[in-house]
Image (cartoon, helix red, strand yellow):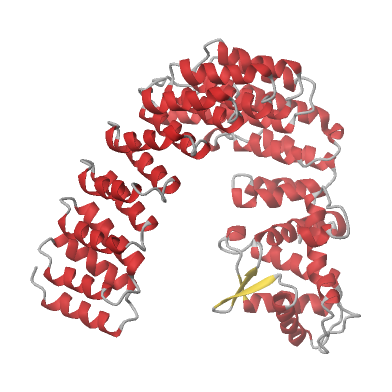
Amino acid sequence: MMAILNRNQELPRDRAELYNQASRVLLHQWDVERALVEDKRLDPKTIDYKDKQAMLRQVAYYMQTGDKGLAGNLIREDDLVMILTDYLKTIEVSPAREAARVMINQLRTRNFMLCFLGADYYAFVHRTFLEYFCAEEYVWKFEKERSITIEYLTTEVFGKHWQDETWHEVLRLIARMIEPKFVGEILDYLMVQDGKREKFINLFFAAKCFAEVRNRSVIASTANELLDKLKALTSYDLWYYYDPIFANEEIKLVQEIRTQAVEAVATIWQEHLDTKTFLKHCATLDNHEYVRSVAIRELAKNFKDDPDTKTILKDRVTQNDSASVRDVAIRELAKNFKDDPDTKTILKNHATQDDSAGVRDVAIRELAKNFKDDPDTKTILKNHATQDDSAGVRDVAIRELAKNFKDDPDTKTILKNHATQDDSAGVRDVAIEELAKNFKDDPDTKTFLKDCATQDSNYDVRCIAIEELAKNFKDDPDTKTFLKDCATQDSNYDVRRVAIEELVKNFKEEPDTKTILKDYATQNDKWDVRRAAIEELAKNFKDDPDTKTFLKNYATQNDK
């Protein structure tokens, strides 16, 4: 719908208006452009797209009163017919009930607003329209009909649903559509609710509703009060003592509230005069590394052009802040200040010297991604692939080396060495995968994979080698025989299972595969081989008439 709208106009910046125009396209313009013939049982002069919108508003409004509310997106056909019939009677369409059924068919087959779910139930094709029309109906009742008051909207609509996330989009759309002074009253109500047990969702949701207000100056005092409450949450803590090391649930809760508060202030009050100063303070002086990390991220995202931002990022990396903060600062430096001459130097230093394996990991990734053409990058990758004492860092270095420097003569040698000699099974896995992916055409690769599949002491490495062999050398005449041997002779159950799975996946269409599975299922002396063969037989040869008979016989006659 956005693409269709954008053909002839600039897309509305207001998403409520975007949904309105998208619905108009489906309910009116879509029919016109396709030159659809109007159903003679409906008079186009009597029922236009605005009537269809009105009916859909009432349908959405009715659906939110159901057992599952907005989460359900479900309405019975009888209820749908009743709603449309009642509306059509108000515009003097007769016979209204017959016209309602015709309208349902149009909304489903011509306008693609509703879909039939079966068992006499319908739903909106896209949940966005359910939410938009529901919000629109509340606004219509509030502004046009004046059948509900701001007190009702505040206490009965927002008051009863602010804790329910399935309602949040509807409530935010309402906040977008009504006058700012009324949103201010709703925010005042939300701020005095007790949200402690709900992780202060009353305040965070109030901030999201405030973000919908176009003329914020109208409710400036309310907005400032809300901002102060959110800033206070960046230092929130529980009232009772908990162990700062072992109380995982408490630590997670406090961290979630504090970081969410920083993000809300940075995102929603980006234009506020104090926000940048507030983020700088959090990024450099807060006692908790997770607050400093999120503040750094928001500072880089929202205030990249401020001269202090780059300085703060550099300082957080170089002044030995915590590993998690250095991690974030390095990522943001590389993403936002790649062209700064210091960035490359900082990445090189931390790729080679940082005492945190996680930080070295990030620095190596960013160096390879942003400075591939620097002659030092390849050297750093080689050194870490072969010498780093962290298996995780060796893993990353090997991947980046294979991805960016495949044609270097040392790369293949490094991959082979680590595929067989690295003391980490995980690194051997990675080296085997990269070798198969990047050097499939090398005459040694197939033999090398076979050796790893049969000789590695770790069963997971043997599994990876078997999978890569089957994937890359399916057409080799020896592969099928090799898989059969592994399926019956390997000492490990997982390896035998993987070999059987690869045999079926790659050679299912060959006439003897089914026979091989049946033989394994009935004659192999290893129970796990028999089980794997039966599972693959049932999964891959379900439509074969012999399979059901075979399974029945096995289920009733086998005594193993």
Residue at figure coordinates x 79%, y 46% from the top left: 176
Quadrant of residue 296 within the rendered picture: top right
Which residue occupies the foreground of this view, 130 or 61?
A: 130
Q: Residue furthest left?
A: 559
Image coords of residue 7 (percent x, y): 84, 60
Q: In the shown orientation, is residue 179 left or right of residue 363?
A: right
Left or right of 402? Residue 5 is right
Instruction: Where is residue 361? Give x, y as percent.
Output: 47, 27
Query: To which quarter of the image does residue 22 belong?
Result: bottom right
For the N terminus, the quadrant is bottom right
Q: Is 407 located above or below residue 160 in the figure?
A: above
Q: Residue at x 75, y 50 (%)?
A: 173
* Residue 384 makes an appearance in the image: yes
In this rendering, the answer to whether 187 lies above or below 130 is above
User: Furthest-top residue in view?
Assistant: 319
> Is there any visible trace of residue 286 in the rendered image?
no
